Image (spheres, rainbow, N blue to C red):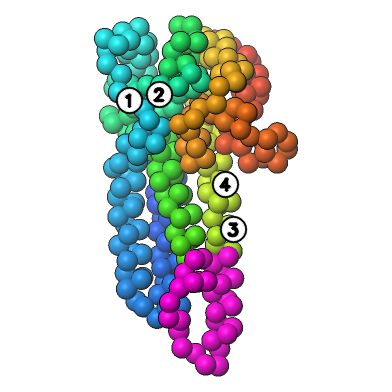
Amino acid sequence: MTPYTQIGLNIRKTWLLFTIFLVVIIGLGWFLSYYFVNQNILFVAIIFSFFMSFISFWYSDKIVLAISKAKPLKHNDNPGLYHIVENLCITAGLPVPKIYVINEPAPNAFATGRNPKHAVVAVTLGLIEKLDRSEIEGVIAHELSHIGNRDILISTVVVVLVGFIVMFSDFFLRMSFFGGRRRDNREGKGELDAIMIIIGVLGAILSPIIAKLIQLAISRKREFLADASGVMLTRYPDGLASALAKISQDQNSLRAANKATAHLYIASPFKGRQAKGWLVHLFSTHPPIEERIKRLKEINI
């Protein structure tokens, strides 16, 4: 697969995600409007789903930066980091993104934004302090590859849209159990109530699983691709491999990260906060660091 076909695929995935979001929210709105005999619920669901899609496209990056407590980094604060970013952008043919810093000791980084002209690279203070220049170059090249591959939009949008699906499903479940007036159907009222409650329960149970599967679909392959693309920029696979090793070995957990934003980072931010086992690896948003390092070592420049 060439970079151009990957870019096109990522753009199609983004629109597919928007479509799935609209279908799910409007569908749940229809169920609620039918169940409570109130068409206004459906109208609100339609309006709100389009509103959230608009917010996700234009402002999801700002939401992610706010959740992550990232602050803009000025050129004079760290000229060396700026020069690394600028040099790699020249090599990649990309506009220089804004640089943000997260004031935490855990080394990590992510890229966000809706396109290369409105992109952001966020790094933790720990990454700046604990990695050497070649390792930082490897990490920045990896994040710039996410920007160049056009997968930053879908990975950022999923934070807002998937989170909203889970929240709306929970709201649906609560209304099914504790809501107001139901449809008056003397013959089938009991059966209808039971069906609607079952749907609500299934929605509440399946939504977090669907959210995780969506994150998996957009995370694992894109990390391998960004690793390889990043190495093409630096021409030095050992830099990124060493950086990944240091990031994985660091025992500091990234407090600003949560389950909604974890897939954005170059490596899992949940040091010491997640169990081990085959089931955890199955639902992990990141490929194993060992496998990523092994692939990097096999790259011949």
Asked whether disc 1 touches disc 2, contact meaning CB atoms under 8 Å apart, the reply is yes
Q: Is residue 153 above or below residue 183?
A: above
| 297 drawn magenta | no
Magenta stretch in the rendered image: 173-201
Q: Give neighbour class at mark 3: few <14, some 14-19, many 20+ (Cα, 10 Å).
A: some
Label disc, if present, on residue 4 of the rendered structure: none
Report the residue at 55% width, 93% height from top. Answer: 187
Q: Main secondary structure of the magenta part?
A: helix
Q: Looking at the picture, which amino acid does disc 4 mark? A: Leu
Q: Is residue 272 left or right of residue 135?
A: right
Seen as rendered, the residue at the extreme right is 277
**Disc 2: which residue:** 102
Report the residue at 43% width, 35% height from top. Answer: 151
Label 2 and label 3: CA atoms lie apart by 33 Å
- Helix, strand or loop at label 2? It is strand
Q: Looking at the picture, which amino acid does disc 2 mark? A: Ile
| 188 drawn magenta | yes
Q: Looking at the picture, which amino acid does disc 3 mark? A: Ile
Q: Looking at the picture, which amino acid does disc 1 mark? A: Lys
Label 3 and label 1: CA atoms lie apart by 36 Å
Residue mark closest to the camera, 3 vs 4: 3
Q: Earlier in the sequence, mark 1 or mark 2?
A: 1
Seen as rendered, the residue at the extreme front is 178
Label disc, if present, on residue 213 of the rendered structure: 4
Label 4 and label 2: CA atoms lie apart by 27 Å
In this rendered view, identify the residue nearer to me: 31 or 94. 31
Instruction: Give coordinates of residue 159: x percent, y percent.
Output: 43, 43
